Image (cartoon, rainbow, N blue to C red):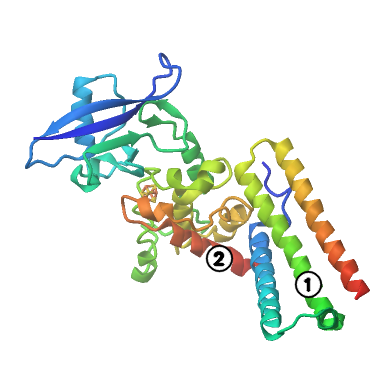
Amino acid sequence: MKTYTFSIYRYNPDVDDKPHMKEYQLEVEDNQDLMVLEALIKLKEKDPTLAFRRSCREGVCGSDGMNINGKNGLACITHLSSLKSDKIVIRPLPGLPVIRDLIVDMSQFYQQYEKIKPYLINDDKTPPARERLQSPEDRAKLDGLYECILCACCSTSCPSFWWNPDKFVGPAGLLHAYRFLIDSRDTATEERLDELDDAFSVFRCHGIMNCVNVCPKGLNPTKAIGHIKSMLLSRAV
Amino acid sequence: MVNAAGTFGRSGSHDYILLRASSVIIFLFSLFMAGFFVSTADVTYANWSGLFSNVWMKVFTLLTLTAVLIHGWIGIWQVLTDYVKASGVRAFIQFVFSVGLIVVWLTGLFVLWGV
Ligand code: SF4
C-alpha cells in the first residue's frame, strides 16, 4: 500500500470566510496507478462536500482543468505516478474567480473566446449546394489548432491573462482566432485582424510560453500567436 | 477600456514596431560606445568632447535619446497596465515617467547643443 497525502483548496462562500487547504490521505495498492480525477472521486466518497467539475473523464471534454502540484492540467489524464511525489497539492485554475472549491467561474475566459468570433464567416453570395471544399494542403493548416478543447489550462497559466483578463484574448482564444484567420473558407480575415490590432488583444503576449508548457492536448498557442502577429505586422508596414 | 490612451503608437502593431525599432537604435549606440571605450585607452576631456563635436555623433546621440524616450514610454505603459490597477495611480506614475523621459531628452539636446 502506498499512502498519498492530498492538500486540497477548499472554499465554500456560503460558510467559509476565506479559502483554506484541507489535507486528505488516500491508500493506493502498490501495483495500481490512479488518475488524479479517480483519486478525487475516491476522496469525495469520504467527504461529499468536496466540489469539482468533471464529465468525460478521458481528456476530451476539458471540464476538470485544475492546478496540480503547481502546474495546470486535466485531472483525468494525469497519473498520480507522473507527479513523482506522494504529496499532492491541488488548487483551482489560477486567476479566475472561485465559485466553490476547485470550481472556477469561466465567464471571462468564454467572453474572450466569444470576442474572436469562433465561427466561419463567408460572404459568398452563392454558397455551394453541399459543402465548401478545401484542398488537403489548406485543410492541413488547421491541424494543431482545431483540437483545442477549451479547458482553460493555458489562459489561466498566463501572467498576461491574469493581469488583463478583460482585454487580452489569451492563448486559447488566440489559437482559435488563428484557426479562422488561416481557414481558406473564411472571408473575414481583414475584419478579424482589425479587431485584434489594439495594444492588448494579441500584443500583450510576451512569449512567456506557459501555455505551451501546460496544454494537455500538446498544442502550441504561442506559435499561433506569432503567426497572428506576423499577419498584423505585414499589414502595418 | 484603457486601450490606447496612455501609450505611444496608434495600434498594437505600431507600438510593437516602435519598440523593436527603438531597441535596435539603442543597441547600436551601446555597441558604438562600448567600442569607443575599448579602443580609447585614455578617455580625456579633449577626445570625449571631440567625439561629440561631430555632427553625425550629435545626430546619432539625439536619435538614441529619442529611441529611449519612445521605448521607455511604451515599455512603462505596458508594465503599468499589467501591474497597477487603480487608474489614478497608474496615470500619476505614467506622468512622472513620461515627464522624466522628456527631461532626459531635452537635457541631452542642450548638452549636445553646447559641445
Ligand atoms: S490550447 Fe490547450 S490548454 Fe489551451 S484551452 Fe485549448 S486544449 Fe486547453
Looking at the image, residue B9 lies above or below residue B24? above
A167 to the left or right of A224? right
Q: Residues within 10 Å of mark 2 (few under 14, many from 20)?
A: some
Residue most toward the top?
Answer: A15
Looking at the image, residue A106 sits to the left or right of residue A63; the answer is right
Q: Chain of mark 2?
A: A
State the mark number for residue B3: none
Q: Position of residue A8 (x, y in %)?
A: 31, 29
Between marks 1 and 2, how big is the CA–CA gap? 29 Å
Disc 2: which residue = A231
Q: Amino acid at mark 1?
A: Leu
Residue located at (71% from left, 82% from top): B36
Residue A171, visible in the rendered structure: yes
* Element under disc 1: helix
Q: Position of residue A155 (x, y in %)?
A: 45, 46
Chain letter belonging to callout 1:
B
Give the x, y percent position of residue B32: 69, 79
**Which of the two residues, B4 or A69, is positioned nearer the viewer here?**
A69
Q: Is residue A26 above or below residue B15?
A: above
User: Residue drawn 51% across and 59% down?
Assistant: A124
Residue position marked by numbered label 1 in the rendering: B63
Task: Residue A117: tell me if it is visible.
Answer: no
Q: Amino acid at mark 2?
A: Met
